[in-house]
Image (tube, helix red, strand yellow):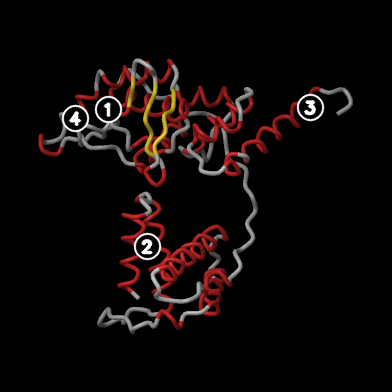
Amino acid sequence: MEQLLTQFFEHLRYERNVSEHTLRNYMSDLLQFLDYIAPQDAQTGNRREVDIKQIDHITIREWLSTLHAAQKKKTSVARKLAALRTFFQFLVREGVVELNPAKLVSTPRLEKKLPVHLSVEDAIRFIETPDTETDLGKRDRAILELLYGTGVRVSELTKLDMSDIDFKEKLIRVTGKRRKQRIVPFGDPALHALLNYLTVRNAFLQSAPMDERDTQAVFLNYQGTRITTRSVGRMVDKYITQCAGLHNISPHALRHSFATHLLDSGADLRDIQELLGHARLSTTQIYTHVSMEKLIEVYDKTHPKA
């Protein structure tokens, strides 16, 4: 089975062009399933051979039951089941098995959570937190301005190269999921923050040995290499603690805020879908629920018959 998993991971990486983050999730989930059906020997580290054709929906359901018993989140269990479905669908396509047993297992019912977003005032207050008198503050301000000003995912922001930015037209070329590209505009605040950061970008670049410098990356760390999604997450956490009244805000909240504020201002849902890089309109439609909540709140506060 390990050889089949390796083939599947190569299929995900080279044929489906999934992100490294998605690939890591698939690997983690499927290796956990392998540990369940064929645990490694404590002394030798070897596993017993697994006949993939003998794995049925009952085996999968029993594994999911152990996850429920371990109080794993329903979202986590659902993701692991989805990984198994995709894996077995690959095996069906390759002629290794005839049927996909994971399709016979029901997905746990999930509560739909509305995306967390900031008010316009809080978003601006948060973005202005970095001290732009410092090199680090200049970089961080540019990152926050671009996240909120374009709605890009953090993983997309960290992939940006200098050649992806058109400063004259105020456009960025974004490489999204499965390497699909889209063009997204940005405003004057993001432009000014970017230009301010570029005055100190070389200071980050020169902190690395010549052969290790990432001259293409827009956003760099103090090692002179491309900043990581984890670093952006830590950076957001740092500024959240400095911003009174804000709690449990992730970098993704700026993307949610971007979409919600556009919708509140009358933007068309399909235009927002294009800007966010959503493959399906249904993914974007969740923001209509967020805006409806705001509408009801305004009605309750202002209408005399509410």
Q: Quadrant of residue 219?
A: top left
Dot 3: what SS?
Answer: helix
Q: Quadrant of residue 169?
A: top left
Dot 2: what SS?
Answer: helix
Between 240 and 180, the residue placed more toward the observer is 180
Distance from Cα at disc 1 to Cα at disc 3: 46 Å
Q: Nearer the viewer, mark 1 or mark 4?
A: 1
Amino acid type assigned to the residue bearing label 3 in the image: Tyr
Q: Quadrant of residue 242?
A: top left
**Can you say which quadrant of the picture contains the N terminus?**
bottom left
Dot 4: what SS?
Answer: helix
Q: Earlier in the sequence, mark 3 or mark 4?
A: 4
Distance from Cα at disc 2 to Cα at disc 4: 33 Å
Distance from Cα at disc 1 to Cα at disc 4: 13 Å
Amino acid type assigned to the residue bearing label 4 in the image: Leu
User: Which residue position is annotated with label 4?
Assistant: 205
User: Which residue position is annotated with label 1?
Assistant: 162
Q: Is residue 114 above or below residue 104?
A: above
Q: Nearer the viewer, mark 3 or mark 2?
A: 2
User: Which residue position is annotated with label 3?
Assistant: 299
Dot 1: what SS?
Answer: helix
